[in-house]
Amino acid sequence: MKMDIQTATVSYGSRQLILETGRMAKQAHGSVLATYGDIMVLATVVSDYSPKAGADFFPLMVDYREKYYAAGKIPGGFFKREGRPTERETLTCRLIDRPIRPLFPKGYQNETIVTINTISADDSGLADVISMCAASAALSISDIPFAGPVGGVRVGRIGGQLIANPTQAQMADSDIQLTVAGTADAIMMVEGGASEVPEAAMIEALAFAHDQIKLGLSAQTELVNKAGQTKRPVPDNSADQVLKARIAGLAKDKMAAAVQVKEKMARAEAVSRVGSETLTALGLEAEQIGHAKELMHDLESDVMRDMVLSKGVRADGRDTRTVRPIAIDVALLPRAHGSVLFTRGETQALVVTTLGTKEDNQRIDALEGNTVRNFMLHYNFPPFSVGEARPGRPPGRREIGHGALAQRALEPLIPPHDKFPYTIRLVSDILESNGSSSMASVCGGSLALMDAGVPMQRPVAGIAMGLIKEGDRSAVLSDILGVEDHLGDMDFKVCGTEKGITALQMDIKITGITRELMGEALEQARQGRMHILEKMNEALARPREALAPHAPRITTIKVPSDKVREVIGSGGKVVRAIVEECGVKIDIEDDGTIHVAATVGTAAEKAINMIRSIVSEPEVGTIYEGTVRKIMDFGAFVEFLPGKDGLVHISQLADHRVAQVTDVVKEGDRIFVKVLEVDRQGKVRLSKREADAERAGGAAEQAGAGRG
């Protein structure tokens, strides 16, 4: 069968990006195979030809999956096949969804599925970026209405030099880690972290990213010219203008009053009441009600946005720069290792720190190889936090994404594991939500870590910025409400310390924002962050000097690496015996580093003494207390150090002639012995006779001194 295969190629970063269509998945509405070195990603798109019944939203689904065969691996687990999406796959779905969603026309409500499979992978970690390009290319060549193309790029900065699409190994030395998506005109999405870099450096990195994106888009444009289909017609909503005008005439003034109600639930009730009254007054046919509700929603948006742009007044009465009131309760939970209740306006997060040991590390199996994570942040968003009566469910894409952002923000300030050898888990339970709950998790997480005694270098705060833009008029909003996120044009979350940025995330609902607006938003975010940090310092200025009473104390000792096997023992017998006897946890590194964790200090001290005795070398002339382990005709073997034994010859058992060894000692007896000799093979000769004589002489001297 002859295939009409079309390709387009562009130099993108350090490699060639090749886009191909016409060979795979030809029954999909759009299909592109993207190749980047050894990375191969297949993106397909399918969209129904009629709107989804009853939908009042755009039903778009992005599904990104990594095939284990891509890296020559077989999945673990009982079933030995790919299962539910991993955290990485979920986060990549969000990366792809966020920049493409705003580029579909308003009113397009046909169910649309974008499926991306990584079918070949190397260890560069760039499959997600290439998947963004492949998904956009598949949409762009399809007949699905889409205002793309959009491209993605990863940016690092090593030694002050910005690099496009660096590998994972290179990113380890980078102080900026950004994933950016955009069109030829503007940036659409930003996700990334940094090592406390200033705002100016971040702006420079974003500008560099956009230049690289524009370069990479040339391949998509070329492929569209070669294989692009005619786009489907977009629904014409011009007939809506009459109904829209009627709704505005009936409800505009009432809606203006409703959106200014300061409390979230009361405002929602007021807006709903205006909607119900207006729909009743309109007297519409049943089939028109759904569309009229959409227009009422548009009216709410128009009124709120005009109020901000014309008067500089927001829904809760604030100006554009003011941060909502902050309340902080530290050390709230008596048994937790660290806890904080962080409240900002109507958003509240209970953030709790738990300290663990190496065995609590999270092990991650990925295409690039297995890794270990010793710092985790888990974000939970129960329905009651927004007054919804529905059962809770496992974390979804939003929860996983918010948790990853907060973790990225705090991670640069966590002390290195060799300086603070704990596994750290943060849990942020959102108890109330009216915007920026992920930023409350960052602020509360920083305080909860310090409350637990984690030696954070500096506190970290986060703030969510918004944007209202109509033509040439624009307003950047600090600390946005939920309604401002929903009805506004941008959600720009910025986290950092007093020194600089540690994480940021940006999503926009318009076709992009200028570099000047982004710079304004970052500067306004810096000012808001400084205000929040000041409030945090009032509650807890520095980490606790000591860990919480119920937190494990980890004591680290170093033994010769060639002694590690002796500490572990055959099949782990020796270390298990220490753990059981002392009630501790022990982690042993190959280099001889040993971490002993215990909630009671005396237990750790006992375990450490036992370990030191195992690795210590017997000293000639030293007396030890040991246990008789084996009786022979010619003497007894005595374990005088853990795992070390020596022979007490029958002639060294007593100061008189001994006929049988069992006349003096039996197996299990505790006796004192003196080391007489350690030969070249490590065999040890012991004497009970000399040990008893020395101990008796010492006792006699003490008795004489007492009488004198």
Image (tube, rainbow, N blue to C red):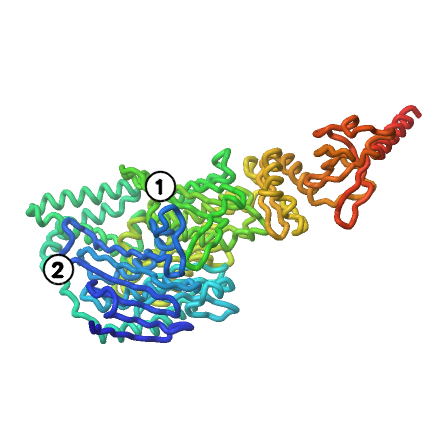
Residue at 25% from the left image edge and 52% from the top image edge: 304
Mark 2–mark 1 distance (CA, rounded to whole Å): 38 Å
Residue farthest top in this picture: 707
Q: Amino acid at mark 1?
A: Glu
Q: Are marks 2 and 1 in contact (CB under 8 Å)?
A: no
Question: Is 527 positioned to the left or the right of 307 in the image?
Answer: right
Question: Is 395 positioned to the left or the right of 408 in the image?
Answer: left
Q: Position of residue 191 (x, y in %)?
A: 39, 59
Q: Secondary structure at mark 1?
A: strand
Residue nearer the viewer, 496 or 309: 496
Mark 1, residue position: 432
Counting residues from the start of the chain, the first of labels 2 and 1 encountered is 2
Disc marking residue 232:
none
Q: Amino acid at mark 2?
A: Asn
Q: Position of residue 570 (x, y in %)?
A: 61, 43
Residue nearer the viewer, 322 or 206: 206
343 vs 671: above or below = below
Quadrant the C terminus occupies: top right
Residue at 86% from the left image edge and 31% from the top image edge: 693
Q: Residues within 10 Å of mark 2 (few under 14, many from 20)?
A: few
Q: Position of residue 391 (x, y in %)?
A: 29, 37
Question: Is 387 positioned to the left or the right of 479 in the image?
Answer: left
Mark 2, residue position: 237
Q: Secondary structure at mark 2?
A: loop
